[in-house]
Image: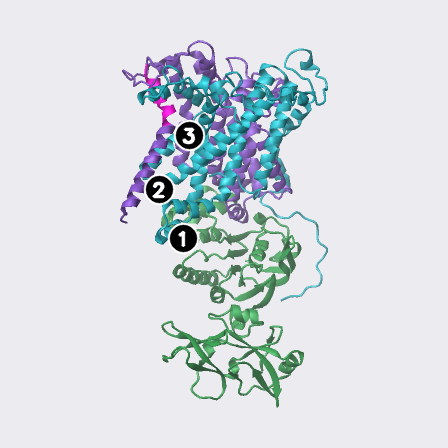
Chain colours: A cyan, B purple, C green
Amino acid sequence: MTTDPAPAPQRKKRNFALLSSRAGAAFLTPAGILVSVFVIFPFFWVIFVSFTNRTLIGRTALNPEFVGFANYLALFDPATFFQRGQFGFSLILTTQFVLASALIGQALLGLLLAWLIQTVPPTIKRITETFVIAAWILPEVVIGFAWFAFLDRDQGTLNMLLESVGLPPGDFLLDQPFWVIVVFNTWRGAAFSMMLFNSAFSSIPPSYFQAADVAGASSWQKFRDIGLPLIRGHIVTDLILITMWTFNTFTPFLLTNGGPSYRTELVSIYNYRVAFQDFQFGKGAAVGVIMMLINLAFALVYLSLGRKKAPKS
Amino acid sequence: MKLTIPAFVGRIAFSALAALLGAVFALPLLWFLFAPFNARAELGLAVPEPWTLQNFVTVFGNSYAVQALWNSFIQAIGGVILIGAAATLAAYALSRSSIPGKGAVTYILLLFSSVVSGSAAMVPIFLIISAAGLMDTHIAVILTFAGGLLPTAMFILRDFIDSIPKSYEESAMVAGASPVQAFFDVALPVIRPGIVVIVVWSFVNIWGSFLIPFILLRSDRNMPASVAIYSFYSEAGTPIVTLLAAYSLIYSLPVIALYLFVSWKFGFRFFGGIKA
Amino acid sequence: MASVEFRNVTKSFGLFTAVADVSFDIGDGEFVCLLGPSGCGKTTSLRMIAGLETPTSGEILIGGREVTHLHPKDRNIAMVFQDYALYPHMNLADNIAYPLKVRGEPVDKRHGRAKEVADVLKIGHLMDRLPSQISGGQQQRTSLARALVYPAQVYLFDEPLSNLDAKLRLEARGFLNHLQRDMGMTAVYVTHDQAEAMALATRIAVMDQGRIVQYASPIEIYRRPATTFVANFVGNPPMNLIEAEGTNRDGRLALKADGLTIADLPITDVIGKALSNSPKLTLGVRPEHLSIADTETGNRLTAPLFANENMGPESLVTVDRQGSRVTARIFTDDHLSLGETVTLGFSTEHIHLFDSMGNRIPAVGE
């Protein structure tokens, strides 16, 4: 080994990288501009607008005035908070909707489907998967129209079926609008949970289940003792994601328009009505801010859970 | 392997349950299998007598319907090109460059993209487009979707690029390739499947979207098919069911075709991608 | 072909120092193996020669030219990667010819040259295939062909055989040996397989924790390992190392350890110096230098039999000294039963002594 004297002072030169910092910055620029203008800027601007009385038309459309917390106070006015068509009613409705259709409906149904299709013959698996996924991938207006036809009072497939087994038909969109959108959203979104759980189950080495088979475990025991504990992380991920999506969904609007008489007016639909039908942008912005705060809470929880990949199932 | 009798019964029960659930999921869609091919279709479930393509002919004769499909196409393709190009460059930089703070950038992007949903940010998006003088233009929809879908697209693609060994580009450079040559000769072809994935994902998202074009577009001239279908069945009066059924099916075809393409090309499970 | 030189090269990744103040040189036409366990800095060193890592401090020279901060493309080197890095979208012809393409060679010329090299490597008939359509051994040869297709100053190999199965690996090793001697290329070869290093290298640099522990010819490293680390790393099975307490008994070394008897080892100046620092010594004997002793004389080690593994031409006889085991390669067919007391003999010339720091104590004449 040679032992040279101390090396000459280092010239400061750039370290090798597959893509230099300067090129990297250039590569990031187009996406950076688009995301800044259409995602990050709106986040801050909606906060600003929520403190003004901006409207779509009229004098305050061009010269909105600063109104402080007036929009928020109007949203949380205790006198009207819980009335139909008011913010509080909408918020509670949305909470019930998320609980029933996402956390219970989609997650449980998705889990059941994922477990079932692990064990059933390939033909049944493929057919079931096809319809569950079709419900999820078809465009939302097509789904809206399909359900519109399905639930039709006089001719719809559902009432036809009910009558054929001797049950009374009903005008469900009018009588049970909330449960209609709950079932609708469960049906629409179960595919995601099914696919996520399916991929989670497939990632468990088959030998785990074979070892349980050898030990004499029943299907239920295998599910409870091996399947479920090993996909706990996926379940948490799934619950957070479907909660966020269901909280923000606008799709039920296509089926019920938020009605009848505000009975299916989720916060997203409430926001739309306030801003684009009542033309109160300031108030609509305030609703947007509250929605984003709720989203932020969920997103922080989600990102802190390992801070790793979003599932690509 | 020989099955015991309880195990056999169990499997039958499982299969029956799975088939039943499949049927429940199929029910609301059944009507769509028949109505488009029935010249006298109504909202009721009826087997066409006879089967006909007359409804499709009618749809293609309706200039408004054809225009709306074309608008959907322009908006989806425009968005896809923008997202594909910008996301590829950005994801490559996030995966391969020495730029400091990459992790923080990714984190902030993910955070904002999940916080700023279309339904929460409809007011500021409307105001930005309005201020930019882009109201009621294709470009308004294209830009809004590009911005909104980019964070997720970048994130999916960055993960994909991270999973590709750096030795591809390294070996090219050792062999004498410049960074630009290594990117175009080696990296780009290798990450092409990932680009296809985000392109398909963006296309399906924009094609199927309703709220953003519903807010940002005013005239029939620019309306995409989603808004057209909604106005067909929601507006007062009886919808022209025959036309609408056929039209909805045509409008769904690209999504179905892309889904089949992706599951054929990349295996079934990919489409679980984040579909916000 | 060119020489390579490291001058006080250090590479740190944050708090972790991968290569610590390493200096060594590789002569023109030499085949140097960087040998060591994973994380010892051997791959980082190789990647610094390639330009894929930049040293934190120090200089690297290729052919006398300082290249420390030069981009890989400007170094005129060739490299074979552990995962082969064959471009999945190019057929073999385009893969092998890629270095010529970036050098601006016309298509027919570069494909002609690629075919020549491929024929030598017996993959000439596969030129239209994609990498995914050929076997692992063929992929390995393709990556080799891509490195050989153009005249480079230095050829770098990053564990190129580690993804092959044992039989193919032997075959490829023999081919590489022949090729290097035939071409006289300067090669740097990273491996954690000591047999590969012994078979291929003109010199081996044994690395541990970012430093070069010994840099010498294979035979020197085998015969005179500089430290217990090297002794333990080279040879299969590795050298037996027995910790013992040394004392001076009338000018002869006495080693106190279970079952060990040293018959007659004069205390030289160097041994005396080591003993004065610490009586803790390590005795090393290679398994092939142990034999079953039938007399109770000479250097010997007595312990109960732990295992007797028949390998065909030889047997590996292992005795158990309360947890520390000693293995002998025995070329005779003795029937031994478990627990039976075995005496293993060895001659004085095969004794390696290491001081309490693990450094070799030179024997007489070293």
Distance, label 1 to label 3, CA atoms, is 34 Å
Report if residue A39 is visible in the image.
no
Distance, label 1 to label 2, CA atoms, is 36 Å
Q: Which mark is residue A119?
A: 2
Which amino acid type corresponds to the residue marked 3 in the rendered image? Leu
Q: Residue at x 41, y 49 (%)?
A: A205
Q: Chain of mark 1?
A: C
**Helix, strand or loop for disc 3:** helix
Q: Split into 4 quadrants, where in the image is the C terminus of chain C?
A: bottom right
User: How far from the left and from the top, in percent, is residue A186?
Assistant: 45, 29
Q: Is residue B100 magenta?
A: no
Q: Chain of mark 2?
A: A
- Marks 1/2 in contact by CB < 8 Å: the verdict is no
Instruction: Magenta stretch: give its range.
Output: B26-38
Query: Could you tell whether C59 is left or right of B159 in the image?
Result: right
Q: Are marks 3 and 2 on the same chain?
A: no
- Relative to residue C194, is residue C62 depicted above or below? above
Please name the predominant secondary structure of the magenta segment in the image: helix
Q: Which mark is residue B258?
A: 3
Query: Could you tell whether A262 is left or right of A81 in the image?
Result: left
Residue at the limit of the structure toward the top, as seen here: B237
